[in-house]
Amino acid sequence: MVSLKFISAVIATAVAVVSAAPLEKRIVTGNSFDHFMVVVLENEDYSAVMKNSYMSGLAAAHNGTLLTNYLATTHPSQPNYIAMIGGATLGFSSDNDGTTSSSSIVDLLEPAGITWKEYAENYTPLSGGGCDTSTSQASGLYRRKHNPFISFTKITSNAARCKNIVPATQLQTDISSGTLPQFMFYTPNMNNDGHDTSLSTAATWLKGFIEPLLTNTAFNKRTAVLLTWDESASSSGNDQVWSVLVGTGVVAQPKNTDSTAYNHYSILATVEKNWGLGNLGQKDATATPFKL
């Protein structure tokens, strides 16, 4: 006869194993993808980016999709970032520090059990993982205006949520440990995103960043990645920005291009549709999700 003590030990061991299971193993399956990453570069016109051979060929090289009719939201930078996760510019009209009590994508993801992180280059959290709401940090390479999560008080007032805003170096650690979150927002520093450097610098950085990820099965497993710019360089025109979808969670469109009208609100619409999250009741509610 099996002893009660033995059965209890087996149950305890099973519980311990489940509790210790890597975060990636406890994912919420999506309709098209299980992981979604957004990478945002800075201030370039679509036409200028398409003159760079690497950027113009990236979608076809990885059987992805170039979005040829993707528009940013406004000028300058910060309202575009707010729009990406808040569904509207929410009163932001400049790059000055500001806050909003509105909901964000985080308020849709967490109730559904979907994990998330903001990976920010050259960002250092406060002691204990608290949110640093400073305009910049000592290196001068990090800027708050490019980290939209820091402007939402429902995030910064929540210690657990603040711990999801991490230095970008954490990405490789999360990949290696199998704890990759399902929604990822990646903010390059002011040099790598091209803001304080050049389009050529941004393209070179992006190549070195994205190519290893796309060949890494620990990262690129039912994963969709949106590579985009926050806004065009020109204040005139329609604010068209270069945007590409790549990854194993992307079904390429014919000739690796899609001329459907998209904008930054399409990010939310795509994530919401994939996991059946509803919407924030902002412009995400009527935005067009990406064809995946």
Image (tube, helix red, strand yellow):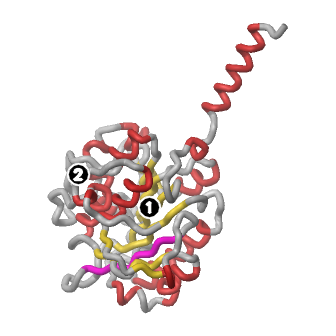
Which residue is at the front of the view, 236 or 275? 275
Label 1 Cα crowd, 10 Å radius (few <14 / some 14-19 / many 20+): many
Q: Earlier in the sequence, mark 1 or mark 2?
A: 1
Which residue, given by chain and number where applicable, does mark 1 sit on? 186
Q: Which mark is residue 281?
A: 2
Label 2 Cα crowd, 10 Å radius (few <14 / some 14-19 / many 20+): few
| Residue at the image position 22 percent from the left and 48 percent from the top | 102
Vertical relation: 208 (above or below) 218: below
What amino acid type should be assigned to the residue bearing mark 2? Gly
Report if residue 223 lies within the magenta region: no
Dot 2: what SS?
loop
What amino acid type should be assigned to the residue bearing mark 1? Tyr
List x then y, in percent, for residue 6.
77, 13
Which residue is at the front of the view, 210 or 150? 210
| Residue at the image position 54 percent from the left and 45 percent from the top | 27
Dot 1: what SS?
strand
